[in-house]
Image: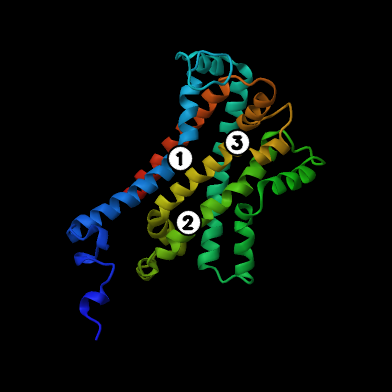
């Protein structure tokens, strides 16, 4: 007969391997947690490291990209804010991103309501088409949009960018609002309707306040998807109108200075700030 000890060969008391036989079970769990946390922390640090390196590079006194920096200065941030080309590209991107946020939020919210609550023919096909900009490579979309926009003279102007970036941003709003609508208890709306409220009033008084945090999160993602977009902007920009991402591509090719790192640091800071807003909104819901 096989003894009980042979059935637990390779294991120690408390569930720990035999090499850790003297460790009590709580200490064994703490050790495993520490090891897993260390591995995940190392992976996270490896992913974030390139972004962190940009910050000291942007403060470098050298006239070219160099790490580690010899000394620290804010010269390249002043050069960015004093350069009319950089400022024009920045304000152009901000204007497009804010307009895209408004358009994508309205269109995306209405689309999400239609997909969740509507009895539409071919709903699954419509949903797949709605999310396709998140799946199709942006370089393919860029080529397609250029071929369509060029004959219509929509390249390099505000309207062309607004249409293109809205197409790219709408799926983010639809995704977040659909999730909120699927969690929403529609009996609350039915109660409002039974009390005499119209469908429009019940939506604005009951449904909209409950899904407003998700709409706000979708709007932030729409802004980021527009402001940070580079591939499509590369195809539909021209000398008359270019985004900050297109300007960065040009300077990398022809004028590679730490200004690029300064602009990248500012964009990272803006993204982190907006993500903090998303976290705050989610924490309050």
Q: Earlier in the sequence, mark 2 or mark 3?
A: 3
Mark 1 — residue? 46
In the rendered view, how is the structure colored?
Answer: rainbow
| Residue situated furthest front in the rendering | 1
Kindly identify the residue that appears in the image at 51 percent across and 18 percent down.
Answer: 77
Q: Marks 3 and 1: in contact by CB < 8 Å?
A: no
Q: Secondary structure at mark 1?
A: helix
Real-space Cα separation, disc 2 to disc 1, in angstroms = 33 Å
- Give how far across and how far down residue 271 sits, in percent: 47, 36
Q: Is residue 215 above or below residue 57?
A: below
Observer-nearest of 235 and 69: 69
Quarter location, residue 276: top left
Mark 3 — residue? 96
Q: Is residue 254 left or right of residue 4?
A: right
Q: Is residue 247 above or below residue 134?
A: above
Q: Is residue 42 left or right of residue 267?
A: left
Real-space Cα separation, disc 1 to disc 3, in angstroms = 33 Å
Q: Is residue 32 left or right of residue 241?
A: left
Marker disc for residue 68: none
Q: Quadrant of the N terminus?
A: bottom left
Observer-nearest of 114 and 88: 88
- Give how far across and how far down residue 256 sits, in percent: 63, 21
Quarter location, residue 255: top right
Q: Secondary structure at mark 3?
A: helix
How packed is label 2: few (under 14 Cα within 10 Å), some, or many (20 or more)?
Answer: many
Q: Earlier in the sequence, mark 2 or mark 1?
A: 1
Q: Earlier in the sequence, mark 1 or mark 3?
A: 1
- Give how far across and how far down residue 164 sits, in percent: 66, 44
Kindly identify the residue that appears in the image at 54 percent across and 20 percent down.
Answer: 66
Mark 2 — residue? 177
Kindly identify the residue that appears in the image at 74 percent across and 30 percent down.
Answer: 238
Q: Secondary structure at mark 2?
A: helix
């Amino acid at each position: 007969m096989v003894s009980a000890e042979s059935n637990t060969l390779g294991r120690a008391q408390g569930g720990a391997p035999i090499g850790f036989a003297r460790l009590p079970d709580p200490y064994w769990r703490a050790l495993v947690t520490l090891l897993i946390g260390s591995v995940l922390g190392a992976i996270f640090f490896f992913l974030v490291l390139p972004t962190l390196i940009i910050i000291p590079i942007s403060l470098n006194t050298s006239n070219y990209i160099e790490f580690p920096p010899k000394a620290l200065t804010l010269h390249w941030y002043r050069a960015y804010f004093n350069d009319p080309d950089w400022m024009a590209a920045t304000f152009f991107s901000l204007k497009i991103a804010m307009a895209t946020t408004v358009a994508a939020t309205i269109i995306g919210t209405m689309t999400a309501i239609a997909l969740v609550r509507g009895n539409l023919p071919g709903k699954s096909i419509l949903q797949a088409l709605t999310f396709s900009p998140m799946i199709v490579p942006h370089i393919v979309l860029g080529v397609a949009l250029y071929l369509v926009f060029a004959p219509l003279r929509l390249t390099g102007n505000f309207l062309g960018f607004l249409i293109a970036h809205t197409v790219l941003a709408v799926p983010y709003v639809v995704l977040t609002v659909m999730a909120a609508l699927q969690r929403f208890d529609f009996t609350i709306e039915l109660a409002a309707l039974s009390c005499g409220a119209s469908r429009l009033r019940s939506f604005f008084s009951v449904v909209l306040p409950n899904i407003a945090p998700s709409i706000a999160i979708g709007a932030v993602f729409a802004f980021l998807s527009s402001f940070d977009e580079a591939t499509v902007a590369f195809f539909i920009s021209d000398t008359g109108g270019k985004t900050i991402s297109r300007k960065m591509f040009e300077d990398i090719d022809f004028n590679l200075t730490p200004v690029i790192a300064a602009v990248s640091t500012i964009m990272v800071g803006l993204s982190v700030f907006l993500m903090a807003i998303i976290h705050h909104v989610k924490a309050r819901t």
